[in-house]
Image (spheres, rainbow, N blue to C red):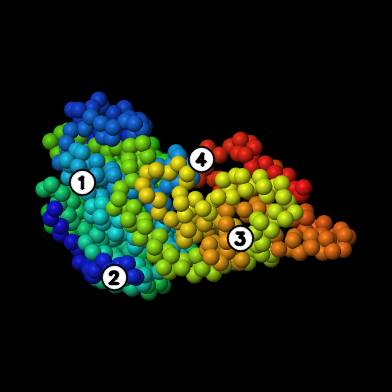
Amino acid sequence: MLKHQASRLTLNWLALLLAPIVAIGCGMGGSSDSPPAEKTKGNTTAPSKVSESPKEIVAGWKDPQFALVLTGEQKGYMEPCGCSETQSGGISRRADLFRQLREDKGWEVAGLDLGDFVKRSRRQDQIKFGVMHTALKDMGYEALTLGPADLKLQVDYLFSTMSNADDLPYVSANVIFYDTPEIGSPARFEIFELNGVKIGVTGVLGEKFASKVFPEGDNSANDLLRVDDPVKSLKPIVAKLKEQGCDILFLLSQASKSETESILKSVPEFDLCLTGGGPEDPNGLTETVGKTVVMEAGRKGKYAGVLGYFPDEEKKFRYELVDLNKDRFKRTQAMEEHMAFYQDLLREQNIVESEPAVPHPSGYTYVGSEKCGTCHTKAYAKWKSTKHSHATETLIKGEENYSETEWISRINDPECLACHAVGWNPQEVFRFEGGFVNMEDTPHLTGQGCENCHGPGSHHTEMETVFTETRQSTPDIVAAREAIKVNLVMAEKQVCVKCHDFENSPKFNFEKYWDKVIHRGKD
């Protein structure tokens, strides 16, 4: 594979560590090896159903001259959480898709990614961003662009990481660091050859998405990060790509679908475009804007699009959106090693304690489930018999029936601890003061314990001690008891769903699950 790279700085890998089938028209006719796709409204082409297990991927395709794997908007999901058997996605299964296309089918394959790799802008997300970059390089990606969440990771960090990009560049026509386009990070574009076809790729950040990076709306006064007009920035890039003889022009558009369409109408030279801003679970439809074929790949890494190039057929491109489910795709050792390395970095940099803890809104602290059990003996015994009591243990050893690969401990991962230990905010993923830190210092806060549902118990236990000593039920004691009560409506609507949300428990049924953990107050 011959690569023609845009100007950028490159350093070594060590520095990086530290710091549904669619026949696509393109104005042409039908494909010879599948029935014509049904036409829908406007200029949209309807695919057959998104790939479902156990159907073969890209079934019925002849061998393309090359294939591109298209992904993006991962939003921090390096892997499925693992709490649900039905979850799709993850870089490990994605790597198996690459393997199947290359080894089983013998195709020339490369990847392109739309960016938005992370969800937040903490140190853990910086670590994840760097590990993700290396993982995608190992899979065989050729270019990436940046989403608004990525651009919140601090420009100095991004520049250091991207300067060490080691032959996998971030490209953007209109994102400028340090007010210096010539700096080369991000690169303006990338050109690479795939089986004799020269492909020119650039990226763009739309105005609406840029406003997520600059909430006050003014990005011109920022001397670290600037986002220029998308159309004005793209036109000279397109001219350069054409000058260098590119056969196919590809746009990675970090923009809403409507803005992507507007951009393509103003810059109509692109053959292909992967756009963001669509649904989490797209239907696999492709649309054409002028001659440009526009595709989506979904969010959170659940899917990957496979684009095949058939230059000798009436319809040059075919597209299938592939559900990365566990029935068709296995975990791969190389990606598991990246995950292990990521977990090692979280441990070595002590990410659990490095982020400041937040006082609980109640003002109280945690005492541990065993302390609760001194009075609530029956409720405690019931809790001990449930999976909730072993939640932290599963981070270390894995679920009882897990068998895909050797388990990698997540005990140092805040995103896992948030629902597997006591004293964390599970939705925003931060630790409350006095919450679980590690097995050595806070062993009494393991499990999905009492206080995650009823609130920190320090004040309640203090008031009960007073009651035991005085045998007088004062207003303060009564108030402390009332404060920790949770009725069924609260449990269903406000408490359980903090962890048993659609992401982690898509089939969660409160009545069914409540029967497994039911417990009632004091003995």
Q: Quadrant of residue 307?
A: top left
Kindly report the distance in space between the C-alpha atoms of the residues bearing marks 2 and 4: 40 Å
Kindly report the distance in space between the C-alpha atoms of the residues bearing marks 2 and 3: 39 Å
**Does label 2 or label 3 sit earlier along the sequence?**
2
Kindly report the distance in space between the C-alpha atoms of the residues bearing marks 4 and 3: 30 Å
Write down the residue under mark 3.
444
Kindly report the distance in space between the C-alpha atoms of the residues bearing marks 1 and 3: 50 Å
Above or below, 104 against 32 in this view is below
**Does label 1 or label 4 sit earlier along the sequence?**
1
SS for callout 2: helix
SS for callout 3: helix
Q: Which percent across, then down, holds residue 168?
A: 24, 59
The amino acid marked with disc number 1 is: Val
Write down the residue under mark 1.
109
Name the residue at the top extreme. Answer: 35
Kindly report the distance in space between the C-alpha atoms of the residues bearing marks 2 and 1: 28 Å
SS for callout 1: strand
Write down the residue under mark 2.
15
Which residue does the image show at 26% across and 34% down from the upper left? Answer: 58
Identify the disc placed on residue 506: 4
Q: Which percent across, then down, holds residue 335?
A: 32, 52
Q: Which percent across, then down, holds residue 143?
A: 25, 56
Lateral position of residue 211 relative to residue 141, left or right: right
Q: Quadrant of residue 209?
A: bottom left
Point out the frontmost of discs 2 and 1.
2
SS for callout 4: loop
Above or below, 303 against 201 in this view is above
**Does label 2 or label 4 sit earlier along the sequence?**
2
Which residue does the image show at 71% across and 46% down from the upper left? Answer: 378
